[in-house]
Amino acid sequence: MGQPLPHPIREATAHHAGDGSLSIRQGRWKLEKTGSSGVERLDALLESYIQRGRSTPG
């Protein structure tokens, strides 16, 4: 006990809030699946980049 581990105990940590929203954290990254997280907006933006084949004007 108290010794550094060679690798994380868990691959990721899932969080479940009382309002039913979910999030997952892996390393320094966190994905929040909540009504106010903007996920739908970002999903739509990513889809538009895929459809256009680019993220910049032109």
Image (tube, rainbow, N blue to C red):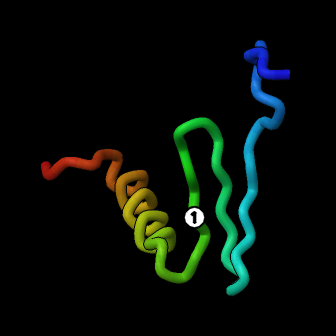
Q: Specify the farthest residue to the front.
A: 2
Image quadrant in which the N terminus is located = top right
Numbered label tally: 1
Instruction: Please tell me which residue is depicted at 83% across the width and 31% down the height of the picture.
Output: 9
Could you tell whether 45 is left or right of 22 in the image?
left
Could you tell whether 32 is left or right of 6 in the image?
left
Tell me: residue 42, above or below residue 28: below
Could you tell whether 24 is left or right of 40 in the image?
right
Give residue 23's quadrant in the image: bottom right
Front one among 41 and 20: 20
Q: Specify the farthest residue to the left.
A: 58
Give residue 5's quadrant in the image: top right
Q: Position of residue 31 (x, y in %)?
A: 57, 56
Instruction: Please tell me which residue is depicted at 42% across the width and 72% down the height of the picture.
Output: 41
Front one among 27 and 44: 27
> Which residue has dot 1 on it?
32
Could you tell whether 53 is left or right of 9 in the image?
left
Q: Position of residue 30 (x, y in %)?
A: 56, 51
Numbered disc 1: secondary structure: strand
The amino acid pointed to by label 1 is Glu
Q: Residues within 10 Å of mark 1 (few under 14, many from 20)?
A: some
Tell me: residue 43, above or below residue 17: above
Q: Specify the farthest residue to the bottom.
A: 19
Q: Position of residue 8 (x, y in %)?
A: 76, 27
Q: Specify the farthest residue to the right.
A: 1
Tell me: residue 13, above or below residue 44: above
Q: Position of residue 24 (x, y in %)?
A: 67, 55
Instruction: Please tell me which residue is depicted at 13% across the width and 49% down the height of the picture.
Output: 58
Instruction: Please tell me which residue is depicted at 42% across the width and 57% down the height of the picture.
Output: 46
